[in-house]
Image (tube, helix red, strand yellow):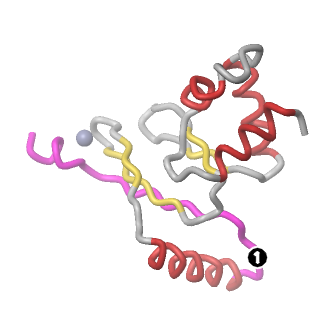
């Protein structure tokens, strides 16, 4: 694994905010000035193909985001304005949910390593207009 690849993977594993490729690029460019945004995007694609990270696609055309925490991921995406918000759970809730998601996988005899739940609907702002 190349240095930029392992740096990106390590960084993604410690975060809960699911950054976009652009955000990752902005954060590593000072330490790795020779790594372009295109390179970051191709590294992320490669890590997805290997199953080491997951890609979170936007339903409303926003940029894709990436996650490697392995913990259940819950986001809300407004179907009108496209606003995306992470929903954070307390660690204890997260672990309980993780157990439940694992059990769901076991029901079809699968060994799961990621889970992602996307809630869609109208955000508070769009609800009032
Ligand atoms: Zn909205």
121 inside magenta stretch = yes
Residue extending furthest toward the front: 31
Q: In the image, residue 17 lies at what x, y percent? A: 49, 47
Q: Nearer the viewer, residue 16 or 119?
A: 16
Residue 113 left/right relative to 15: right
Q: Is residue 68 magenta?
A: no
Q: Which residue is the site of mark 1?
A: 110
Q: Position of residue 121 (x, y in %)?
A: 29, 52
- Could you say whether the residue bearing mark 1 is in a helix, strand or loop? loop
For ligand 1, give the image quadrant. top left
Is 88 left or right of 63, judged from the image as shown?
Answer: left
Q: How many marks?
A: 1
Query: Which image quarter holds the C terminus?
Result: top left
Q: Quadrant of residue 98?
A: bottom right
Boundaries of the magenta span? 108-129
In the rendering, at what x and y percent does residue 81 appear? 28, 35
Residue 33 position (above or below residue 91): above
Image quadrant where one finds the N terminus: top right
Residue, x 76% and y 22% (percent of image)? 39
Q: Measuring 54% from the left and 45% from the top, which residue is drawn there?
A: 18
Q: Nearer the viewer, residue 85 or 109?
A: 85
Mark 1 Cα-neighbour bin, 10 Å: few <14, some 14–19, many ≥20: few
> Quadrant of the rendered structure where residue 107 is?
bottom right
55 left or right, relative to 74 = right
Considering every residue shown, the one lying at the far right of the view is 1
Looking at the image, which residue is at 65% across and 20% down?
29
Seen in the picture, residue 94 relative to 21 is either above or below; the reply is below
Where is residue 69 shown, x and y percent of the image?
Answer: 63, 57
Q: Which corner quadrant of the image does residue 111 belong to?
A: bottom right
């Amino acid at each position: 694994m190349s240095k930029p690849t392992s740096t990106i993977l390590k960084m993604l594993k410690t975060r809960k905010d699911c950054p976009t490729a652009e955000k990752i690029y902005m954060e590593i460019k000072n330490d790795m000035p020779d790594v372009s945004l295109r390179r970051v995007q191709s590294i992320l694609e490669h890590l997805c193909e290997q199953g080491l990270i997951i890609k979170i696609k936007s339903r409303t055309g926003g940029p894709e985001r990436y996650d490697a925490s392995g913990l259940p991921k819950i986001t809300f995406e407004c179907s009108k304005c496209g606003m995306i918000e992470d929903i954070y759970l307390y660690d204890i809730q997260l672990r309980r949910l993780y157990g439940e998601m694992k059990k769901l996988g076991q029901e079809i005899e699968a060994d799961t390593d990621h889970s992602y739940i996307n809630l869609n609907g109208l955000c508070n702002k769009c609800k009032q207009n």
